Amino acid sequence: MEPVRNDTTTDRRTAVELAKRLLVDSIWRTAKIEVDGVTFPDTQEIFDGRAPEGMSVDDIVTVNNIKRAWRFLLDNIDYPVDWQYIREYNRIIGEGLVRDAGRLREYGVRIGGTGWVPEIPTVESSQERVRGILEESEGEDTAMLLFGAVTRGQWFSDGNKRTALMVANHQLIHDGIGVFSIPPEDKAQFVSMLLRYYETGDYSRLSDWLSQNAVGHVPGG
């Protein structure tokens, strides 16, 4: 398959340049969702191939996997997001941490802090959801909807938020829009709004908040 070339190519290059400048910061912000104690200097050390003193092996692997996921994104950014990319991001995110990384969840789960019980996903249901989003939306809306689908659907056994962040970034950067990350100082508000979304299924409030607070647009975007 050949990379898709369209009028967004110049903007895509600008978004890629922005992503590269913010790469360590984006890795850190993504890791902060799961690893509370990780610092920016810790992330920089791992990015440079060193193990921070006193940091657990699992936490180091978590950060390093996010680094690898970003490398994969940048290597494949000329291709649009699809269901296979979503699975591959989860596989990279969970490698060495989760036995069934990249495979759809096959058992029921409960989410702490909420009564929401997501359905057990199937290949058909998840593919249909992704296909519907890609056909019925575009640009930033697509990125936000993909993020919402992966997080609330809990398609994978672990790493759903990190996977959703990578998928949203792939969509935003591919379309030349910008870079997506959760500000660490807003994590508590983000989690609260995410749990509300899980409970109600109403994504509008969280989606608007993410667009305003988590998307760093390219200059002029």
Image (spheres, rainbow, N blue to C red):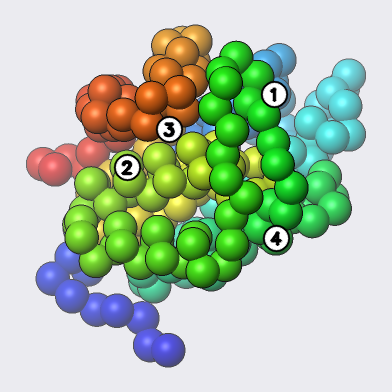
Dots 1 and 2: beta carbons under 8 Å?
no
C-alpha separation, residue under disc 4 versus residue under disc 3 = 24 Å
Pointer 2: what residue? 144
Residue on which the image places disc 3: 181
Q: Position of residue 75 (x, y in %)?
A: 50, 67
How far apart are the two marked residues, 1 and 4, measured between alpha carbons?
23 Å
Left or right for 23, reference 89:
left
The reply to whether discs 2 and 4 touch (Cβ–Cβ < 8 Å) is: no
* Kind of residue at disc 2: Met
What residue is drawn where x is 59% and y is 33%?
Answer: 117
- Disc ID at residue 35: 1
Query: What type is the residue that disc 3 sits on?
Result: Ser
Dot 3 and dot 2 residues touching (CB under 8 Å): no
Mark 3 to mark 2 CA distance (whole Å): 12 Å
Q: Which secondary structure, mark 2?
A: helix
Compared to 206, does 74 lie above or below? below
Badge 4 density bin: few <14, some 14–19, many ≥20, Cα 10 Å: some
Q: Nearer the viewer, mark 4 or mark 3?
A: 4
Tell me the distance, in whole angstroms, between the alpha carbons under discs 1 and 3.
15 Å
The Cα atoms of the two marked residues, 2 and 4, are separated by 22 Å
Secondary-structure class at tag 1:
loop
What residue is pinned by disc 4? 103
Q: Amino acid at mark 1?
A: Val
Which image quarter holds the N terminus?
bottom left
